[in-house]
Image (cartoon, rainbow, N blue to C red):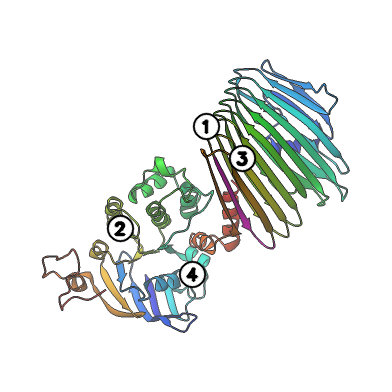
Amino acid sequence: MNSVTQDLLSIVADFGGKFEGAYNIRQDCQSVARQSTDNVKIENKTDGKPGIDIKIAPNTKGENVYIPACITKSDVDDLVYNDFYVGENADVTIIAGCGVHTDDSEASRHSGVHRFFLSKGAKVLYIEKHVGTGIDDGNRVINPVTDAEIGEGAILEMDTSQLGGVSASSRKCTIKLDKEAKLIIRERLMTDFNQTASTDFVVEVNGEDASVNLVSRSVAKGNSYQEYRSKIIGNARCTGHSECDGILADNGKVNAEPALIANCKDAELIHEAAIGKIAGEQILKLRTLGLTEEEAEATIINGFLK
Amino acid sequence: MLEIKNLSWTAPDGRKIVDNVSLQIPEKKLIVITGPNGSGKTTLAKVIAGVEQAESGQIILDGEDLIGLDITQRAKKGIGFAFQQPVRFKGISVRDLLMLAGGENTTQKQLEETLYKVGLQPEKYLHRDVDAHLSGGEIKRVEIATVLLRNSKFMLFDEPEAGIDIWSFNNLIDAFSSLKKNTESSIIIISHQERILAIADEIVLLKNGKIAEHAPKDEIYPRLFCMNSENCGKKRCGCPKEVRV
């Protein structure tokens, strides 16, 4: 892998020179490093699509699986399909960040389509960081798609963040939950300059006693624009909570459209949303602790996106 | 020592809320400012802290006039201020806020001791966010803790008792009593609460933005809480000697 990839990996996957466990490193549309373990097998897809199948054996415990993708130059358009098959009662962490680097005003794009199939009792912590770097704000585009089927009693915990430098992003998640399954999504998003970002979460809760918790926090600075759409569909006795908080700075704009659809009288669905600038009282409090106005704003935003 | 000279502040609608107030708060002294609602107590506190800018007057801390300084500069010079209505922060933990207050060299022991002083168990609170999951009373105690930990030359607490339950209030009284004994700082507490008034060195009665009375506690306190009735020391009895607040 080249040095740009190494730099991007350090940001999106805490890369310190090597990964422990199973990994596949994708650089500019191809795999440049791969390792399987006894319990985690990574293989090229056999259906003709670019990408890999990741098969995690039942009862695998405590292993990390790294599936990062990096674009290291301008004028690259990458599309990849990664499918994760997680065996019964496995408990693993999957780190799948993406970094896009451009050298000039030519655009580069990464579109990653990740599908998850969690068997009964499986537990996955899925961490996905996105970042853009480069000299020029050269249309760095990241379009992640996440489709998941969460089996009986399984848990998918998804921690996503877009750290900056991404010119445009479009996130689409479609997730279905079986009986007693659990979904937790934490999204952190910051846009600046003329960047745009859109998020679409569609969650179908089909099994009894399943639960969903979506928390999205975003900061829109500069002239950036964000769209947030979430839809929780309760088709059975279940609980669902959606929370969307946005901080506006400069001329940033946020359009949030949360939706709750209860198709079962025992579905308990809640939504909370708050969008606005940083409260003046928060700035004042931190200033009484000796912070400048700028330091106070940065502290509030960093905490909010933590 | 903090010295306030001829301090005034007028509301945008023209009402004079703080009217030519002068006060001296020596080191190691605790002064409680009391008075009826709307008498200008909180505004006076905000003007001292720099949250509101004075229309005229001086605020002199250890010989230096702070009147032209903003909130941050005053905080750095040694003004500590606990708001009456603390704010909440999503994503900032109690530990984060206390570290901002105490500085990066603040030790775990200092964090824990400060939380104990305000009646919060560190193991239950340090990791929690200062957000809507904390009750009003808990947030209030965290707010007070930020000022105690900061240990500024001058500490100003605006109605620290508001929203605090009786058990925590007992801790708070102990904390202020201990602070008074052990600190080198000057302290102002704005309060209506008898037990806070009772630990003051001096009491200032503010009415219509002006100082109506300023005297040692032993002189003014008996008249605030009349000692002649069966309610003595517990609540105002309404006798003619009482100074109504």
Within the magenta stretch, is there residue A245?
A: yes
Give the class, few, some or many, for how many residues have Cα within 10 Å of label 1's Cα (few <14, many ≥20): some
The verdict on a common chain for dots 4 and 3 is no
Q: Secondary structure at mark 3?
A: strand
Q: CA distance from mark 4 to mark 1?
A: 50 Å
> Chain under label 3?
A
User: In the rendered image, which quarter contains the C terminus of chain B?
Assistant: bottom left
The verdict on a common chain for dots 2 and 3 is no
Residue shown at 81%/39% (left/top)? Answer: A71
Q: Disc number at residue A233?
A: 3
Q: Position of residue B43 (x, y in %)?
A: 42, 73
Amino acid type, mark 1: Asp
Quarter location, residue B125: top left
The verdict on a common chain for dots 3 and 1 is yes
> Chain under label 1?
A
Q: Give the residue number, with chain letter if any, for mark 1.
A: A209
The verdict on a common chain for dots 2 and 1 is no
Q: CA distance from mark 3 to mark 1?
A: 14 Å
Q: Which residues are magenta?
A: A240-251
Q: Disc number at residue B51?
A: 4
- In the image: residue B28, left or right of residue A108: left
